[in-house]
Image (cartoon, grey):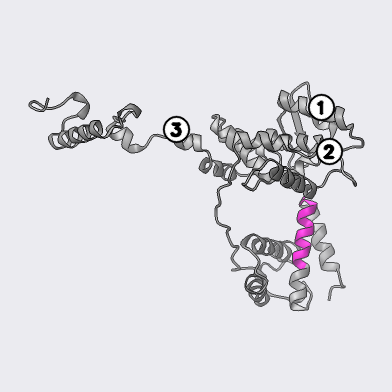
Amino acid sequence: MARVGEIEERFVAALRLAWFAETTIRTYTHCLRSFERFHGAGAEDLGHEHMRPYLEYMRNVRGTGITTQRMHVHALRHLYTRVLGRPEVTKGIPTPRPPEVLPDLPTDEELRALFAAAPRARHRALFRTMYATGLRVAEAVRLRPGDIDSAAKLLHVRHGKGGRGRRVMLSRRLLAELRLYWVEERPTGEWLFPGRKGHISSASVRAALHRATEVAGIERRITPHTLRHAFATRLLDRGVDLRTIQVLMGHGDLSTTARYLHVSTARIEATRSPLDVLEGEWVDEGEWDRARLRRRLRRERLARRRLVDPRQGVLPGMD
């Protein structure tokens, strides 16, 4: 029998060896403790028959959502498969899939108002950094002054998700914003955006973003991830290819980046309908008065009956 806390120690060690983020490690250990607390026994003494009652309790009694339950399944699956060597415990346990919800993106005017309403120069620089580069909030708060390559116009992301580093573009406007912030606040220490202890926390950024949203009078909900979504969608609208956006976003799978195809209204508006390709785009914007449209529709129907191209003119006797 394992001593108290030994399984958790092994779990944490395995997660760190796999380069999981510290926030994920804390979340997964919380899931382990919750599972053991529910059954009143250690994970090594629990099996497949204990999984479903726990997940049903999570959903039906505690009222947890899909995302939370999905996280618990992932945590316990990693524990029993990678640490305890008992993959049969979680075999057949479904991983709930959250519904695909398209992000509600802010307009350009709302973004300008949001940046102007930032509580401090530090927050304004952080908001603009996330929007200009597509960084996750956990990546942005861990930036160091040495990560700015002003000569090459690059920003080095050294603490990416899954331990993956990358480089993103550093626009001249963002560089000027960061220099202004540096002059105004004179941050000290190793972090570009310092907080009370180490770097500024992700929770502080979310709170500042919420305050700025209220001050700016923006009704839609804006989170750090909203700025990241807006970055990717704006690039797609401008014709940047998916592979480039994938690299800039730090996505491990192109299918993750492809979600933004559903959000890009410019792409949707620019896509020709197959009906237009088949029969021709014969209705122009200036031809929408009812009488002219009815005449065109009559010509279309008649031409279809006689197998005549409607763009070749009316049939004899129909002038």
Indicate the quadrant containing the C terminus: top left, top right, bottom left or bottom right.
Answer: top left
Q: Residue furthest right?
A: 189
* Above-or-below relation of 23 to 313: below
Residue 228 or residue 26, whichever sits in front:
228
Residue type, numbered disc 3: Ala
Residue type, numbered disc 1: Leu
Q: Quadrant of residue 62?
A: bottom right
Mark nearer the N terminus (3 vs 1): 1
Q: CA distance from mark 3 to mark 1?
A: 39 Å
- Whether residue 122 appears in this view of the structure is yes
Classed neighbour count for the residue bearing mark 2: other residues with Cα under 10 Å, few (<14), some (14–19), many (≥20): many
The magenta segment: 19-32
Classed neighbour count for the residue bearing mark 3: other residues with Cα under 10 Å, few (<14), some (14–19), many (≥20): few
- Residue 270: mark: 3
- Looking at the picture, how far across and down is residue 152, in whole percent? 75, 22
Mark nearer the N terminus (2 vs 1): 1
Residue position marked by numbered label 2 in the rendering = 193
Magenta: main secondary structure equals helix
Residue type, numbered disc 2: Phe
Residue 276 or residue 291, whichever sits in front:
291
Residue at 25% over, 33% down:
293
Q: Quadrant of residue 65?
A: bottom right
Residue position marked by numbered label 1 in the rendering = 180
* Above-or-below relation of 152 to 298: above
Position of 319 compared to 36: left or right?
A: left
- Residue 287: mark: none
Local SS, label 3: helix
